[in-house]
Image (tube, helix red, strand yellow):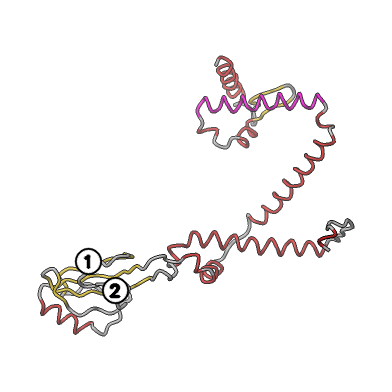
Amino acid sequence: MKSLIRILLVFSLVLMAGCKTKDPVIVTVGDSKLHQSELYTYAPDWDSWGDRERILFLQHWIEEELVYQQAVKAGALKDSVLIRMIERTKRKIVADYFMQTFLDTMIVSDVEKIDFYHKNQNLYLNGKTSVSGAILTFADWKSAVLYYKEFKNTKFESIPPNHRLVKRMREFDGVDMTPDPCMIPSIRRAVVGRITPMKVCDGAAKIAVVTNRLDSADARPLDEVIEDVSMQAWMEHQNVVLKRLKDEWKTGIPIITKINVFSEKEK
């Protein structure tokens, strides 16, 4: 614990002294120095950390640097096996970084998202039948009759507007069970867009209207799944672009294979 406190004390003194410089040195181990700019690169959330988190990070950096310096003194960097491992790692890092520069600039258009949605609607099936609409209640039977006569031939694609004859309107949206067993006995057989004939249910004159129905095999609306569609469309766009780039690069560089990599059984 004393060593932790000592590290924190030294660190605080270094920061105070380093305020006069643009990039102060936080920790020195032999000839190796950890500058403040590097610190924020390794630990972007440093400012939100508590003292213990900071001390543990610095301890880890110091211990890792000590081991690295001992490895260098022991000639590890001249080891042929390690040299090949470093080279392979470097090649992968460079290749990944280079490809990431292309990915960072890729933009998927709304047209691509919509196209992906329509081509892959099987990914966004509703899974169950659901309906949206409204139950209209009237003050008396006469009001219900007058309303029915006025709107029986109207095609409703959204909730009916307020009307003087309607006493109360109860809306329902995306329900997978009937909102009123009396007015809508079955959501699967309900007529979409047309008001039902009048009925007296629960002591009141009512009319129902189903404005939309999604069956179990129907795709959910795009606006409900747009986040996933955007991600999937971006991944598809990425694969197409990267394949095109790699194909273009192959045509510009000679690729020759001289080693027979297949066994006799595969010929």
Q: Horizontally, is 140 left or right of 187 in the view? A: left
What is the span of residues highlighted in magenta in the rendered image? 50-74
- In the rendered image, which quarter is residue 249 located in? bottom right
Residue drawn at 27 percent across, 82 percent down: 154
Residue 86, placed above or below residue 55: below
Q: Is 55 covered by the magenta stretch?
A: yes
> Looking at numbered disc 2 in the image, what kind of residue is underneath it?
Val
Residue drawn at 65 percent across, 34 percent down: 38
Pick the residue in front: 260 or 247: 260
Image spot of residue 114 (x, y percent)? 52, 69
Q: Which quarter of the rendering shows the C terminus?
A: bottom right
Disc 1 target residue: 170
Residue 244, placed above or below residue 206: above
Image spot of residue 40 (x, y percent)? 60, 35
Residue 241, placed above or below residue 154: above
Of callouts 2 and 1, which one flags the residue occurring earlier in the amino acid sequence? 1
Image spot of residue 204 (x, y percent)? 12, 71
> Looking at numbered disc 1 in the image, what kind of residue is underneath it?
Arg
- In the rendered image, which quarter is residue 251 located in? bottom right
